[in-house]
Amino acid sequence: MHSFSEDEVRELLDGPAAIAELEAAFRRDWQSTARMPARLHLPLAHGGSFLIMPCADDGQGWIGMKVVTVKPQVAPGEARVQATYFLFSHSTGQMEATMQANHLTALRTAAMSAVATRALSRPDARVLGIFGTGVQAWSHLALLPRVRQFTQVLVCGSSPERSRQFAQRAAAAHGIEVAPAEASACARQADVLCTCTTATTPLFDGSLVRAGAHLNLVGAFQPETREVDEGVMGRARIVVDTYEGALAEAGDVLIPAKMGVVSLQDLADLHDVLAGKKAGRESNQSVTVFKSVGCAYEDLVVARLVYSAAAAH
């Protein structure tokens, strides 16, 4: 059995390969071969969460499970999320690998946003807006330029200082113009907007979002929390990673649906769009939203990549 540290996962897991593999996986009818129950969400004392995410892929021959602890508050320098992945052979039932999975989770989430951005955003998108300055924000900044030719990145963190520090570090690391921005400017100017925060209420006035914009919503994962308001959701074409996850956990979708602003019957999932079963972007002026709550199948696909990359070395 192999045991992979965070540093080893980071070294082995290639971002463009993850984008390509996840896009191929969601394009095919993966639900005919992969089985996963709804994510088990166990509330912990003081507002924390313990998540269990199993998946069996009969077609690819793997079984996997991710366990995650989420803390509401952490000390400086301490990770808010701790994840571990367990990978098993489908044929033997034997555990083949364990992986520290914080980077795996961040990268697969950003890779899914990249897949959705390529499918739903305008090809001429040039300004990327990011809310948040944490691990997810960094991963999105690293991967989304793989699918669109952004010339500028705007960053809005929880404070001007955090935005400034992130922008400086990101510009030096990626060689792209990255600037701190107020929430209203970020929402108004971005062609592609990513919300990568721990916010529980809307981050900006949705009426500011420009016609033709695409949004990736990744932070909120509970039915009573959301990062954007009903104003933008009510005028958007909404695509989710999975129907089951969205209808159970996506407050960004469920709250405006309760208000009568969003029709759940009008949702599409990413497989439907990639396979051409349902429409994605309908015009250059349409607003599109990809709401991601994450699913166990995404983790299994990416964990398989780590294991295969190690075997190839």
Image: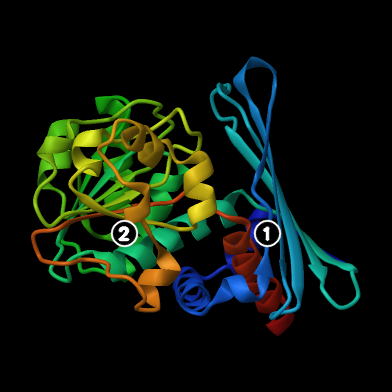
Residue under label 2: 174
Q: Which of marks 2 and 1 is nearer the N terminus?
A: 1
Q: Let me know if residue 117 appears in the view.
A: yes
Helix, strand or loop status at disc 1: loop
Residue 149 vs 194, above or below: the answer is below
Residue 159 is labelled as none
Instruction: Inspect the image, locate mark 2, and give the three-letter code of the amino acid beneath it.
Output: His
Question: Is the Cβ of the residue at disc 2 closer than 8 Å to that at disc 1?
Answer: no
Q: Residue 106 at x, y = what percent?
A: 51, 52
Q: Let me know if residue 182 appears in the view.
A: no
In the rendered view of the protein, which quadrant contains the N terminus? bottom right
Helix, strand or loop status at disc 2: helix
Task: Name the quadrant containing residue 160.
Answer: top left
Task: Name the quadrant containing residue 42.
Answer: top right
In front: 256, or 204? 256
Instruction: Inspect the image, locate mark 1, and give the three-letter code of the amino acid beneath it.
Output: Met
In front: 101, or 272? 272
Residue 262 vs 37, above or below: the answer is above
In front: 189, or 9? 189
Residue under label 1: 36
